[in-house]
Image (tube, helix red, strand yellow):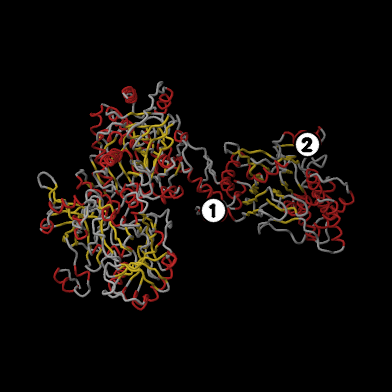
Amino acid sequence: AAGMFLRLLSDVRWRAARPPWGGWTRSRRSSSSAAEPHPASLPAQAQVVICGGGITGTSVAYHLSKLGWKDIVLLEQGRLAAGTTRFCAGIVSAARPVSIELKMADYSNKLYEQLEQETGVKTGYLKTGSISLAQTQDRLISLKRIASSLNVTGIPCEIITPKQVAQLHPLINIHDLVGAMYVPGDALVSSADVSLALATAASRNGVQIHERTSVSHVLVQKGCVTGVETDRGQISCQYFVNCAGQWAYELGLAGEEHVSIPVHACEHFYLLTYPLKEPLASSIPTIVDPDGRIYIRNWQGGILSGGFEKNPKPLFTEGRNQLEIQNLQEDWDHFEPLLSALLRRMPDLEALQIMQLVNCPETFTPDMRCIMGESPAVRGYFVLAGMNSAGISYGGGAGKYLAEWMVNGYPSENVWPLDLKRFGSLQSSRTFLRHRVMEVMPLICDLKVPRWDFQTGRQLRTSPLYDRLDAQGARWMEKHGFERVKYFVPPGKDLLDLDQSKTFYKPDWFDIVGSEVKCCKEAVCVIDMSSFTKFEISSTGDQALESLQYLFSNDLDVPVGHVVHTGMLNEQGGYENDCSIARLSKRSFFMISPTDQQVHCWSWLKNHLPSDSNLTVEDVTWKYTALNLIGPRAVDVLSELSYAPITPEHFPSLFCKEMSVGYANGIRVMSITHTGEPGFMLYIPIEYALHVYNEVMNMGQKYGIRNAGYYALRSLRIEKFFAFWGQDLDAFTTPMECGREFQVKLEKGMEFLGQEALLEQKQHGVYKRFTMFILEDHDTDMDLWPWWGEPIFRNGRYVGKTTSSAYSYTLERHVCLGFVQHFDEKTGEELVVTTDFINQGEYEIDIAGQRFQAKAKLYPFSSLFTQRRRKEEVELSGYQRE
Amino acid sequence: FYLTPPQVNSILKANEYSFKVPEFDGKNISSVLGFDSNQLPANAPIEDRRSAATCLQTRGMLLGVFDGHAGCACAQAVSERLFYYIAVSLLPHETLLEIENAVESGRALLPILQWHKHPNDYFSKEASKLYFNSLRTYWQELIDLNSGETTDVKEALINAFKRLDNDISLEAQVGDPNSFLNYLVLRVAFSGATACVAHVDGVDLHVANTGDSRAMLGVQEEDGSWSAVNLSYDHNAQNEHEVERLKMEHPKSEEKSLVKQDRLLGLLMPFRAFGDVKFKWSIELQKRVVESGPDQLNDNEYTKFIPPNYHTPPYLTAEPEVIHHKLRPQDKFLVLATDGLWETMHRQDVARIVGEYLTGVHHQQPIAVGGYKVTLGQMHGLLTERRARISSVFEDQNAATHLIRHAVGNNEFGTVDHERLSKMLSLPEELARMYRDDITIIVVQFNSHVVGACQSEH
């Protein structure tokens, strides 16, 4: 290892002696001919093998070694930092819309800043700042939303006028600008050198680095990693980390046990020029012009400018071709729109001489967020890939989270939005990926308004009722590949076309959803909720009950036919899943969880249930169509269709019965809804779906039945303060923090996962509290709408962020849900959040920089649950607006 | 004023025609995928003609362009009649007999040709009987001659050309009792026309050319680039062999007067042509026919005028030069065009433009900066231009139209310049001929798979 380290250092010094970019075609060649004469032999075993010597691989190695794991081997098929890392533009920017990504980028920036001092390797780190330009008001709104988010995270950031832009950057044409966002802390680095510095530090900590060694596949036994097979021999190991970038997909499929890693590469172009006559100052800020789809940074007195075109060129769909990556062609005709945008933004550059157009493949994922975590299929198989052209910004932070994940069992932040398990094998079709990344790459620059949907790779999973609903005006969105109805456009009513309907303000579906909500409250609606994940767990003896009692915090030892709402908690008491479980018999249970839990929940159960052949878990998601009958007349419809007494005495709330509906027998009916309205969930074997739907609609006519979609559902559940997993709840939220103590049975007579943590919280209090906010001075018609991620201020101080929001048609107000924390005014230390703390504050919600007064509530309006009591309650709470 | 792009398009597309060979016509798979043709007039009326037809009693397809001069009568007659003469020349003895018997007994005639005509391509109804009789006389002679040998395509083409020109000459000498027809046959004979005709049958491509229209083969090289192969020789003063031939055919005393100012006898640009009896008949014959002809002819200064140094007629022949080419898979298309195109465009450019159009891949040389000093502004200008070039491709659904757009609208960079195109197309009739000639183009596209398959059979 020592020899390796010396060679690496000399290599680094040799590289650093050159201008970081100058003549790199030459250096690449000379480095390949000057291959190390005696490649160090591979060790026979290691704790961890990391595949990939780019920014992600070296960052994981660096952070693992920092956390004290030393027995690590990093394998790189070519040279360190010679792939996308070598070619990428080296911009480190925290201006990211997703909070976890923002945190990763912020950490990366801080890491890189001190890296040179720590390692002695020049990284080219330069704090230049960045300016994101807005050519339209909508763009400015989206920048303001990011700015709010940056500010509360402690990253300095301001919204500036076009004039201020001109002062910061002399070359910019500001005539078409309406404003900009300035982030002074953003930086530039030489990406390859950062990667080499991380490798150097890791190497010092004992990580062995082997170049020119390619992994052919990963060895798996009994669902666990046991080693890797390379072109230079085998290494046995406990952990494998796939950091293979654009090759991650193929490497995942290379072994006997397939690991689906949905990534796909696209060509990405940027331009290098010779220096300007008056070379640009090295401190000149990086420009991001999303409306022009370009970024422009200083590069040795000239510029480096690239972008994300509307018509990307996906590549390597058919598979790996290592030769091609070196020989990717410059395509000037393809670059033309970006060049036009550049010259429009900086007209003075006309006379600047071109040095090169670089073609650097970038790896994209189906939802524009990177992929990390452990494979659901193979234990010990970790992945960090799919950086969506922000590998340098995320690399540091992502490496840290993954290392924490491996060492501690879970990262220090909620990374569910990045978790590999958010995808299933359904996102691994090569055609799907090719089509989807062609949409994702332009999206990097596109304006993202609330509730946008992907347009490609749709209609993959559908309910048997899809065509019926579509014919009735359904508008669709997609979750985990499943098509779900947003709302139904009544016949004769036209909505705006897609582009025009994109707005941060009141959307065009406002009245449509309003009437669906009204129908849910006054009559009866039917919502197709087939996408929910459904498992059946059964055993020959008591194994099912015993294991589930351990996995779930509520008491599942209930009489047969009861339904229990419960969290599936981790050691820290945080929600890994939020489920409804029906006890079908003494020994079998039916479990319903959110749609995107399909992979995560399966893997959690697999990892935590005892391996007992008498205990079976089956994914029955595809077997049932789920219809939600919701509203006060649901009971009438159902009783007419089943000739069975459905009155509360015979069928109280939270019950499950198998019964016939119409001609169809064996329909699993549960007296639950996911919104708090009265109603039933019907789990229908799919072959009966159309029949039952038709019967329900026919019978329901006299009760005023109509179809409704998820937007109505969302409005209903948010006004009733119902938290949803994945949106409000995550692995870092406990039932105690979201007012669900009643779903935890600490004294159920047996130990369960998370029990200790919950006991601790019960005794000492919680550090955040799920709170409901009703916006007071918010004008629904004129003001920007909240979405989620808006900062919450208490008495003028930042206390947390919203997690979801909706317009309540009953309250005629916007309702936001979010978590309130209590930071010590002096030290910033987190303090216990008490009921008094919540109740005794003046709250404001920040929507794109504008603050709206909000009233905080810890409990829902009980009036909303029953029609009768509504009036008095409304009067009491002062929300009467009739 | 300028024409708007839609106006320009409506002018350019007025005469466009496309024909796709049905993929399976019940008999055999054709080596021709189809063809695009178009013509843009400069003369009013246009003096160019075009023809395309499928031979029904033999295999193969005939395509031709005809450039008329001194009026359009001769070009019109040749465009109507020549393919029948060729088809008949190719027919086997039995078929000729069958046809003759049918005519004799008043039965329905076997169809000989299936025409592929644009609505503007007309046939003269009045002369059809006259033309038919001449044709019948020809096949009767062929029946009498019965050589028993299988017909050689090259021979057939040469015979057909010569026979038609001979018939045109004879019809004018004999005249017709109908004064309209009488005047028509005289106008046909006294005007002239060049002809460039292709016969495609499987991998055998024959091009028979008389005059200065041109046939060119578009070949795609292995690297995807396009090159041009000539399949005809121009019969004009630039062709040394033609000048040589003329000198051989006439006494040495005329050597200097034969070609003056690059023209035959100082008058005619093409050195071979149909009609043009003023360069074929003896002075006596010309005088006799003109004097006995209708007044319109008698009053016409041009017809009365005898070319200078006219000592040993005929000076002109309609005999074509025939080139035979075996099609290869890399031979993607054939362009037949009158000299209006070739005056404005180099054949290499024609090959590239049509090739790129037909393949849909705009194999523009990818730009590489390499060691050149290029500024962002220059690159931007260049790219914008290239984009315009591509977008102009998509406006056209017809390769011939696309070629005309380039021929008329190209600027010095080889890019279609809308302003220039608009200017050229809005010229008043009397000026148009000064800036451009009639242009007629046929682009025939070959089926490389069929060609490849035929090739491997042999």
> Rounded to the nearest whole Å, what is the CA distance between mark 2 and mark 1?
44 Å
Q: Nearer the viewer, residue B139 or A727?
A: A727
The residue identified by callout 1 is B8
Q: Position of residue A483 (x, y in %)?
A: 39, 59
Locate the N terminus of chain A by quadrant.
Answer: top left
* Host chain of mark 2: B
* Residue visible at 23% across and 67% down in the picture: A812
* Host chain of mark 1: B
The residue identified by callout 2 is B246
| Number of residues whose C-alpha sits closer than 10 Å to that of mark 1, classed few (under 14), some (14–19) or many (20 or more) | some
Instruction: Identify the secondary structure beneath mark 1.
Output: helix
Q: Nearer the viewer, residue B179 or A467?
A: A467
Q: Is residue A213 above or below residue A861?
A: above
Whichever of labels 2 and 1 marks the residue nearer the N terminus, that label is 1
Locate the C terminus of chain A by quadrant.
Answer: bottom left
Q: Nearer the viewer, residue A351 or A784?
A: A784
